[in-house]
Structure formats: structure tokens, C-alpha cells
Amino acid sequence: MKKVGFLKSIHFKFILIYVLLILIAMQVIGVYFVRQLEEQLVTNFTASVNERARLLVYNIGQEMNEERNAKSLDLEEEINTILQDFLSDDITEVQIADSHFRVIGTSNPYNQEVISKRTTEVRVKKAIIGEVESENILLDQRTGNRMLVKAIPIKVDEEVIGAVYLVASMEKVYEQMRVINGILASGTVMALAITAFLGVFVARTITRPLADMRTQALVLAEGDFSRKVNIYGDDEIGQLAATFNDLTNKLEIAQETTEGERRKLSTVLANMSDGVIATDREGYIILMNEPAKRMLSVSRETLHNTSIFSLLNLEAAASIEQFYDNQDSLLLDLSEQRKKYILRASFSAIKDDNEKPTGLIAVLRDVTEQETIELERREFVANVSHELRTPLTTLRSYLEALADGAWQNEELAPRFLNVTQTETERMIRLVNDLLQLSRIDSKDYKFEKKVINFTDFFEHIIDRFEMSKGADFVFERAFTHRDRYVAVDKDKLTQVLDNIISNALKYSPEGGKVRFELLQKENLLHVRVSDEGMGIPEASLTKIFDRFYRVDKARTRKMGGTGLGLAIAKEIIEVHQGTIWADSQEGKGTTITFTLPLENQREEKLS
């Protein structure tokens, strides 16, 4: 075991805690003291300003009452005289406004132009109109100093005849606070220095015997049970040393017994295919075999003090007591964005001689493949049921109508019979597609592969569609007429191309262009069919080859699709050791590409 660094040692932690306690105590006392002192200083300052402001309001009010019918010039001179006597270091500016919101006096010699003008201060207007005395502490944007701003109504016989607007600097108050804070900070630093010195002395008396026990424990960890810990006294640490020596004797006996059992258990767990996790009474992991570590992608280092519920994402599922009684297994979905991964976890309780639970045993098994197959089976059954129910419901409705007498209606009867025939043919197509998929999935199904010239074969398929649809679409052949040989089942590959070209024509606008390309890369032939149709959303590109998947279900059913054409094409291409995929942009068209192994190794660029 490596030596513990000073910053991680108990010695350092003890000193740190000791210093932090003093620091926190000093800070709590300092904050409380400073806050109370600040409140008191602000209160005293505000009270002093208020007293002087009330005296000023009284004098201005008397002067305004005496001169209300006299010329405004005499009143303004008297007010300016009063203001000059009133000014002090704290009060930086005073303005007087009459009941018409007109400024009739100001103490600021640099702001005399405001006299005889209407005041712009909202507080003054509120004081005159609403008889409200307002008081706020604001920050001067120019100097950064805090200012006390007041607006006081001037009343004579309960009549508001004006208002006093007063601005007082509070910087002296906060200057006193800064001095006091400096004194407190100096005191705190001195207290911390003394505390740190005392902490070092006290910590050494405690950590020295602990360091000795640690040294002896390292020797014990190496298997030497003959060494004993030195006992320095009869205090708690001395008792701990004596207990340590007693424990050493018991460990020596127990180790010999448990070592043999441990080897047996390790051998069994290591050779199991299932993952096994053991926990203690609180659910913390005490044992995990290698298969479980591989299943959960964890290492031995990450398991220390880890709960099985957090490891398996079961923290909100239930308490550990419920797992002791519940024998049912759980499915754990650990799938990532593109990789499906499901585990089945079975739990059983570990019990002591008194049948009391002392822990859990969890057995993990990878059931990804089974669950995937089961999910696909359920989806397939649901899709088949849905696809058959729609035409059967339609058939029943029309047959009931015919049975109720619609067959006698010469106009309705042919239409009803035509619908029933169409739906019957649709079910036949669906059943035939399902049978073909079933045959392809069967391991006994054989493909009759023959080497053919794919260029001639491809042109023959295109000619057939061009003869029937050439008037409505433009067919563009973007490939050279050279020989390209592949080994394929001609009938099955015809079905693949029929499905792809039919879809291109089905979803293309009238007069649209369908482009056919052949590209030879190394030993693979790339076959592309592009249209100018509605396109496929990006989220659906990887799903269109799934069975029964439709981008637009309503539109596809209207056009007579079963949702199996591309699925069959994918199965056939994969049997031919090829791949198939789609590229598309919504509103611009779709390109279906599949590959086939060539019978030669020639390379050709796209023509």
C-alpha cells in the first residue's frame, strides 16, 4: 500500500476541520455583526436626514404660504437662501417644486436652468398628487456611490402646495463599514494562524499511534499474523490497538477455513455461463463473476461501494425487502442507440441460520435474441391480423348488403361484386407474399441460380415496363450495353425488380422520369432505380424493408400495396449474398440500390 499523501492524511484533515470550524464561527459572527451594524448605521443616517428634511419642509412650507400671492421671484430668492443654509456634506442636492410641478428652487449651482421648468422626477409628482412620501436607496451610475433619495410633500393646513426632492450621499456610512470589515478580516486571519498552530500540535498526538497501527496493518495484510500492534496507553486508541491484536488472532484461524471455501466458490463462478452478483444486507455488491462483468461492461474498480440497484437501474423499482420475497425475474433493457441488449435477472435471498435475509443473489442471462424473436413474432402476428381484418371487414359489409337485397339492384350489385373481388385478390396477394416469405425463411428452400448476362436481363425488364407505362413516364437508361454476368435465380430477381420499378412508377408524378443505372465496383454489381416521386422521410429509410412497414399507410393501401414487396426483395437479395438500401429526399425522389456478386473481377466506372 502506498504512503498516504499529506493532503489526504487524517493529520491534514484534522487541522483543516479545526481551522474551518474557527473560520465558519468567525464568519457567522462577523456576518451577523456587520449586518446588524450596517442596519443600525443606515437607520441612524436615514433618521438624521429625515429630521433635517422635516425641518426644511416646515421652513419652505411657511415661506411658500406667506408668499403664495406675492411675486415668484421673491419666493425663489427666499427658498435659495434657505437651501444654502440647509446644505451639508451628506446632502448633495435639494429641489423644491410647487403644486404645479414647477421647480422653484435648487441647491445645485450647476443646475439652475431647471428653475421655472416642470420637474421630471416621478417621485416628486407622486408626492404632490398622492401626498405620498417616498424613500429609496439608489446607486449613482456616474460615481458608483449609494444615494438616499426622498420626495416629501409640503403641506399647509392639510393642503399640498409643493414637494421637496432630496438626494443624500450614504458613502460615509459604507466607508465606516469597509473599515470595520477590514478590522474583522485582520482578526480572522490572526485567529486562524493561532488555530492552525494548535491544530498541528493536537493532531500529532492523535495520528502518531494511528500511523503505527497502519504500519502494523500493512504487515498483517501481507499474511504475517505474528506481528502485534504497540499499545501506547489505556485510552480509546489504546483499546483499539488491543482489539486489533485480538482480531489478528481470530483472522489467522478464520483465514485458513475460508481460503479453501473461497477457492471452491471462485472456480464454480468463473466457469458459469450466466452472470452472478452477490450483495450484502443493504444491497451493496460484494461479489461478481466475470460473465456478469462482461454483460454489464464494468470493471472490478468501479464496483466498490456500488449498489446492485444503481448498477441495474432498479433504484425506483422496489426496496430490497421486496426482492427478498419476490421470486419473479425481471427484464433489464440495456439497449443502446443502435444495439439491442436485454438481460433477464433472477433474484434469490441469502439467509443465515435463523432464516433471516443477509443479502441477495442475482443471476443474469442474456435473452436479447429470444426477446427480439418474441417481439418480431408479436409484431408480425399483429400486422398480419390487421392486414387481413381490413379486407375481411369490407367483404362482410358488402356481402351483408348483397344478402339484404342489393344483388337485385342492377346498378349497385356489379359495383359491390367488383369490390368483393378486389378485396379477395388483395388477400390472395397478401397470403401469397406471406407464403413466399415463409419459404425464403425456410432453410430447405432452394434457389435455382444460373449465370446470366444481367445487362440483357435488366433491359428486358425495363422494356416490359416501358411498353405498358411508356406513355406516362420517361425511362432513362444510364448504363452501357456491355456484358455483366451474375449467378442468380432469374424468377426471383425478376420479382425484386418488378417490386422496385412498380414502386418507382406508383409514387412518381405523371410524366416523371425513372432512371436506371448499372455500376460495377470491384466484384460487385450495383443496380440503381431512381424516381422523382414524393420521397421518403429520413427516419423511415432504414425501416422500409421491414415487413408490413409503410411510410404512409393510407396512401399505400389506396394504391394496393401489402407492405411486403421490399421485405421480399431484401430477403431475395440477401440470399444472393447482396445488400439493398434506399437513398431519398422528401419531395425530390427516391433511389433504391442493391448489389450482386459478379462472376468476374473487372472494374467499370458509371456510364
Image (tube, helix red, strand yellow):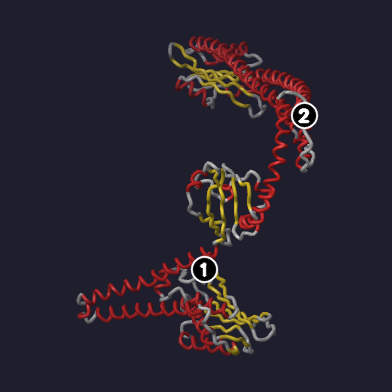
Q: Is residue 376 above or below residue 580?
A: above
Q: Residues within 10 Å of mark 1 (few under 14, many from 20)?
A: some
- Tag of residue 102: none
Left or right of 193: which side holds 111? left
Residue 88 image offset from top left, x and y in percent: 64, 14
Q: Is residue 2 above or below residue 152?
A: below
Quarter of the image with the N terminus is top right
Q: Residue at x 35, y 77 (%)?
A: 423
Residue 94 image offset from top left, x and y in percent: 59, 18
Give the secondary structure at mark 1: loop
Asked if one can make out residue 74 in the rendered structure from this viewpoint, the answer is: no
Q: Residue at x 50, y 70 (%)?
A: 546
Q: Nearer the viewer, residue 287 or 382?
A: 287
- Tag of residue 543: 1
Left or right of 407: which side holds 519? right
Three-letter code, disc 1: Lys
Q: Residue at x 61, y 79 (%)?
A: 526
Give the secondary structure at mark 2: helix
Three-letter code, disc 2: Pro
Left or right of 321: which side holds 410? left
Query: Pointer 2: what residue?
Result: 209
